[in-house]
């Protein structure tokens, strides 16, 4: 999708830099697929823009969506100091933050059943970024579990909020499952 002039002006008027500064706390946090969590935040934001989302609260939250969950002892009040959008941004970040000790399945069911539209859109973009990163994962068990989780929990969310994002997730799951098939993992699993 080519960004129109109105969207460009809306994006230009957003102050994303302070949120990016907060997100730099994630630079030292490595990801299972390599890289770091800071890059994942920006990837998630770029996926939202790619799908035409130019909402300041959504984009600002995407830049810091893993901050509270992944930086031990992070003070959420630091977010509230950023700008006038900060209370809404923090609310959205908290909505997509898995609570300590919470089962992942419980967390994802909560988003399905009670999540706001913005939380569902953000979670879908987050999962697209994560599924793309699976191309760098060498653990077939992790890939299979992640594909299963995506089909069971994220497909319903994506289907509700954005059919094109849902279609991309289907393609990503299909390619990852094809990898598992070609690698012989599924045959070895049957033999066990």
Image (cartoon, grey):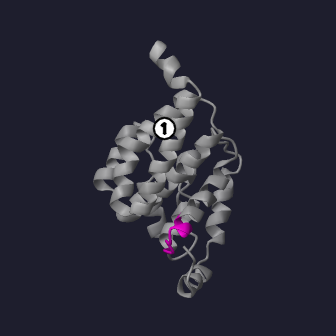
Is 154 placed above or below 180 here? below
Is 45 on the left or on the right of 57, as rendered? Answer: right
Quick check: can you spot residue 102?
Answer: no
Quadrant where the N terminus sits is bottom right
Counting from the top left corner in percent of width and height, residue 156 is at: 34, 51
Q: Does the magenta stretch include residue 97?
A: no
Is 163 placed above or below 132 here? below
Q: In which quarter of the image is residue 83?
A: bottom right
Check disc 1 and report the residue beneath it: 146
Who's the residue at 51% across and 47% down the image?
Answer: 172
Who's the residue at 43% across and 56% down the image?
Answer: 167
Who's the residue at 52% across and 18% down the image?
Answer: 188
Residue that lies at the very extreme toward the front in this rendered image: 182
Who's the residue at 48% across and 55% down the image?
Answer: 168
Is 58 placed above or below 31 here? below
Q: Does the magenta stretch include residue 49?
A: yes
Q: Give the range drawn in magenta.
A: 48-55
Counting from the top left corner in percent of width and height, residue 174 is at: 48, 43
Counting from the top left corner in percent of width and height, residue 6 is at: 53, 87
Viewer-proximal residue among 74 and 189: 189
Counting from the top left corner in percent of width and height, residue 88 is at: 44, 69
Viewer-proximal residue among 155 and 45: 155
């Amino acid at each position: 999708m080519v960004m129109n002039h109105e969207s460009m002006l809306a994006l230009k008027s957003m102050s994303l830099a302070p949120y990016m500064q907060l997100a730099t706390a994630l630079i030292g946090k490595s990801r299972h697929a390599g890289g770091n969590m800071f890059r994942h935040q920006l990837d998630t934001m770029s996926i939202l823009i790619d799908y035409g989302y130019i909402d300041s609260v959504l984009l600002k939250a995407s830049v810091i969506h893993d901050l509270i969950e992944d930086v031990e002892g992070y003070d959420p009040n630091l977010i509230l100091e950023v700008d006038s959008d900060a209370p809404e941004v923090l609310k959205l970040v908290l909505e997509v933050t898995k609570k300590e000790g919470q089962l992942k399945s419980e967390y994802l069911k909560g988003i399905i059943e009670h999540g706001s539209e913005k939380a569902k859109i953000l979670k879908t973009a987050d999962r697209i970024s994560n599924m793309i990163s699976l191309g760098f994962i060498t653990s077939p068990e992790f890939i299979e579990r992640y594909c299963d989780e995506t089909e069971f929990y994220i497909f319903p969310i994506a289907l509700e909020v954005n059919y094109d994002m849902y279609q991309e997730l289907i393609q990503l799951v299909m390619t990852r499952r094809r990898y598992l098939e070609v690698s012989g993992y599924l045959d070895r699993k049957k033999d066990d």
